[in-house]
Image (tube, grey):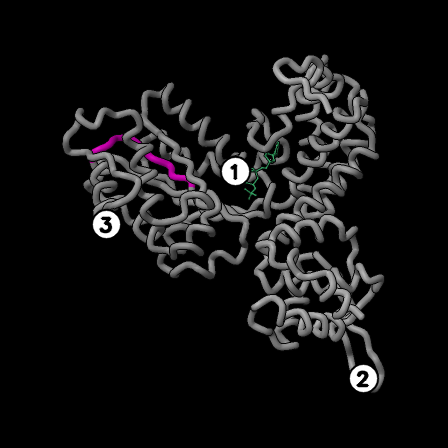
Amino acid sequence: MTHDTNDSPGLFDKFLSENRIFRDREVLRHSYRPHILPHRKPQIDQIAAILAPALQTETPSNILIYGKTGTGKTASVRYVGTELESVSARRGTICRVIHLNCEVIDTQYRVLAQISKMILGEEDPSSDKTRIHIPMTGWPTDQVYSELKNQIDTSTGVFIIILDEIDKLVKKSGDDTLYNLTRINTDLSRSKVSIIGISNDLGFKTFLDPRVLSSLSEEELVFPPYNAPQLCDILQQRAAIGFAEDALDDEVIPLCAALAAQEHGDARRALDLLRISGELADRGNGSKVTIEHVKKAQAKIETDSMVECIKTLPTQSKIVLYCMLLLHRAGQRIFISGDVTRIYKELTPFLEIDVLTARRISDLISELNMLGVINTRLVNRGRHGRTKEMWFDTSTEKIWEVIMEESDGRLAQVDEQIVIQIMR
Ligand SMILES: Nc1ncnc2c1ncn2[C@@H]1O[C@H](COP(=O)(O)OP(=O)(O)OP(=O)(O)O)[C@@H](O)[C@H]1O
């Protein structure tokens, strides 16, 4: 075999030729921030009305925002935040918006330290000896809080702190951070803090102490899911900048919108579908995106999310899934819990793991069903009572690959002879 080493002419050439599909692919990514957000005017106006007092150096009410994923919560809040900062700069007042993603910054220490870091910004630590830069680890949390409070007391202006995915913070570290932050403003503070919490978990409130909840949710907003025509408008707007002229068949955007609306009106999913459809057409060297590309993109997204889900399963669930895969590979398209339990019990001596009861295995099967990895239905078997039948909806090849890679090699090492014996 020959390898072109240094210069491989042509390796990227075909990808670099003038793109017939995309004009600006970045516009189709989640990170792109559009200047106009169709169908979110009422929510944007409402947030602006609540935050407007900040322009007169008054403290705006705290806001709690709910809505399913991809309903434009972050995009709308960021949009209002950017406007607020620029209007306040023009008016000579100070409003600063601090955006934290609590999926990443999920402990009280890190939240407080990050807010402080953003308040001090580029400030030279030696310029004001009374304000100390908080290290990202190492201090007692009380000290972090009192230093942040000191910084707020000695700063000027209004700080709007956006805690995006606030439910992740509360689930990981409790509601102490919120309790402390909602009490940081005092009459003596020169600057004011107001909080916007964003969550896509509608049940999140139940995790909060009533006192924290009432301070945090002085105002509450719910972002409804988008319907298909609304998603069409959102996609049209992005496609006009992101795709080359005439690159999309007429049915493409309505199909992406309809599929995403069926899910739960998620603009992120709609954008993913459109971008991936474009990428498939692009890689196939086509000059048009068609509904076939959309269908393939939909299948790809589903497989990718299933793979991610399987990777995070606990070991015992992976083993139960492995038993089902063995049955499927042995030609059984529909199997019952009894079959799975039997294979599981015969297999476990070779795996050095705790052996679960049939009841527990049945629970894991139900979980796999809920996650959409398998399908199940209860059937009546006369005097044998009711039993659970199950089957795979999609091709199992990818699931098999992931299970083989992901079980620390344990399942890949199960001797084929043993499997043959068990499956007999
Ligand atoms: N009305 C809209 N107009 C244009 N783009 C939108 C609109 N709503 C959402 N989007 C786009 O959809 C994507 C997801 O939006 P966003 O992150 O705001 O959703 P979210 O509700 O905060 O979701 P999550 O709860 O999962 O974080 C972003 O790329 C955003 O630009």
Instruction: Specify the quarter for ligand 1.
Output: top right
**Extreme residue toward the bottom, this view:** 383
Residue on which disc 3 sits: 140
Q: Does the magenta stretch include residue 57?
A: no
Asked which secondary structure carries label 1, the reply is helix
Numbered circle sitting on residue 348:
none
Observer-side mark, 1 or 2, equals 2
Q: Quadrant of residue 190?
A: top left
As rendered, which of 198 and 291 lies closer to the eye?
A: 291
As rendered, which of 81 and 308 lies closer to the eye?
A: 308
Magenta segment: 154-162
Residue type highlighted by circle 2? His
Work out how far the residue at label 1 is from the one at label 3, CA to CA, in angstroms.
32 Å
**Extreme residue toward the front, this view:** 1
Q: Is residue 71 left or right of residue 133?
A: right
Observer-side mark, 1 or 3, equals 3
Residue on which disc 2 sits: 384
Q: Is the CB of the residue bearing disc 1 within 8 angstroms of ligand 1?
A: yes
Asked which secondary structure carries label 3, the reply is loop
Asked which secondary structure carries label 2, the reply is helix
Residue on which disc 1 sits: 74
Observer-side mark, 2 or 3, equals 2
- Position in image of residue 344 (x %, y %): 68, 70
Q: Is the CB of the residue bearing disc 3 within 8 angstroms of ligand 1?
A: no
Which of the marked residues, 1 or 3, is nearer the chain's N terminus? 1
Q: Residue at x 75, y 24 (%)?
A: 282
The quadrant the N terminus occupies is top right
Residue type highlighted by circle 1? Thr
